[in-house]
Amino acid sequence: MRRVYLYDTTLRDGSQGEGISFSVHDKLKITARLDRLGVDYIEGGWPGSNPKDLEYFQQVRELKLSHAKVTAFGSTRRAGVKPEEDANLSAIIAAGVQAVAIFGKSWDLHVTEALNVPLQENLAMIYDSVSFLKSKGIEVIYDAEHFFDGYKANPEYALETILTAERAGADWIALCDTNGGSLPHEISGIVTKVLSLVNVPIGIHCHNDGDLAVANTLAAVQAGVTQVQGTINGLGERCGNANLCSVIPNLQLKMGYNCLDAEHLRHLTEVSHYVSEIANVTKANNQPFVGQSAFAHKGGIHVSAVLKNPKTYEHMNPELIGNKRRVLVSELAGASNLQYKAQELGMKLLNNKEQNRKIIQEIKRLEYEGYQFEGAEASLELFLKRATGEYQSSFSLESIKVLVEKRGGQEMLTEAMIKLRVGERVVHTAAEGNGPVNALDNALRKALEECYPFLKEMHLSDYKVRVLDEKDATKAKVRVLIESRDTSGSWSTMGVSHNIIEASWQALVDSMDYAMMRQMANEADEEVVLKASQG
């Protein structure tokens, strides 16, 4: 298996994506996680551009990395300035890194119009910068910016820029599709030409403006490059960079290249989620390989086939990259979906075919009414266990009253009054909130936490409302989706009604009920373990 080196630029190029901002602490955490994954190079930032990156390079020295080389990024010297007097190059040296990626212009258009310097001066800037950094004992990766556009416009000059970097001692030359507009066959042909002329190893750096960054990266590797640059989840400026979460499994599992140890590869999905959380961005469920829906099956015929042989509808084993198969239960569900979901939940509902048929029909009716169980699996589990008698709620509603009052220019006040039957007791509580749903949530908690104190650890982490019949305007039916979280994880529940308060109440009740059901299961497991330990 030919070795392909991974160069991650999430912390630098990825942070240039719209809405992405990493603190120094964020960058240090991601660095440590990428090192454990087995990435070879981690581009931490541009020390000459801002104080945050300067601080990062000071603090990253304290991390005990086991594999990765932290890399600084920067540009060639300025025109007419000696390299030893260039502030950018001095900042790179002061960063104290083992390796640096330094970019220079390969497209004559950029040289004459963006830099506004003679073509020969640009070559001198490349040579002086690379040779100066090499004289300091630093590994130099020369990023040939806009190389593919430059080659298509003026191949002789584009090639001369990278040959200049090679003569200056560059350890790597990375060919950049900076505008992201090249096609795979163009990448392959140009890389092949470059490899026939240079002796240093070649890397590839693709942007995704044509939605081809991954395909272009794979084409470049197939043509002979041995370093791939990209970001986790494809973060980056404009349309993003080559997504390493797709590049890595394609190279290793489908094309036979060696990027990561197999054990490390199993953490790829986890790393993808980790970076999304720190970046505070919602990861697309349908992201290939590592997305929540990447191996999700909904159609009954598909599920039936997958249960017999996963290869029928899966292009690879999801566990190899730390993902998992999911079977969704919806209006498209059949007996196979229900069977799989029951096995997943540890339920015994498979012996009664008539009962199962009624359950499927009820699910389809509810989905027709606007429920969407695939997005609220906690509500689905509760529905199935209630339908089969495996679970009964620990509380029931006697009455609800919600008061909303606004006087003059004052803020609107909301109060919810709830009467619940909790076991043999009737609990009557009231609570205020900044809106009807918040007031209901507060009152429900107040009623239940005395009997179930573990609910204090639970909180609502997300609340979404979807209007199902837009044409009905304010009379429209709505679907409310609530995500709740505690110290052990998160779960989603939902409610559907023409009344948004009713829909919210349904979702809130399911959320509390699910927490109780899970707590009861944990206590039962602990009791079994205790009895076993006592002999």
Image (cartoon, grey):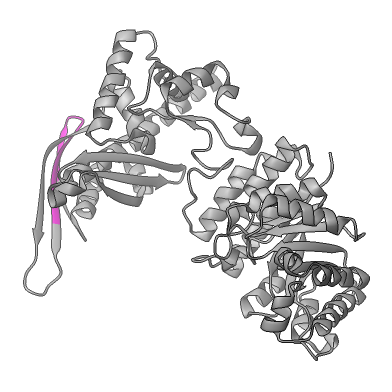
- The part of the image, by quadrant, that contains residue 242 is bottom right
Residue 208 visible somewhere in the drawing? yes
Q: Nearer the viewer, residue 154 or 426?
A: 154
Q: Nearer the viewer, residue 176 or 290?
A: 176
Q: Residue at x 90, y 73 (%)?
A: 134
The question of residue 128 being in magenta is answered with no
Residue 391 visible somewhere in the drawing? no
Q: Give above or below for 118 relative to 205.
A: below
Q: Give above or below for 505 relative to 174.
A: above
Image x and y of residue 490, in percent? 42, 43
Image x and y of residue 439, in percent? 20, 54
In this image, 344 relative to 514: left or right? right
In this image, 498 relative to 288: left or right? left
Q: Which residues are magenta?
A: 415-428
Image x and y of residue 371, in percent? 28, 35
Q: Residue at x 88, y 73 (%)?
A: 164
Image x and y of residue 249, in percent? 68, 41
Q: Nearer the viewer, residue 132 or 178?
A: 178
Q: Nearer the viewer, residue 194 or 13?
A: 194
Q: Residue at x 80, y 67 (%)?
A: 155
Q: Give above or below for 26 relative to 424.
A: below
Locate the C terminus and report the quarter of the image it occupies. Answer: top right
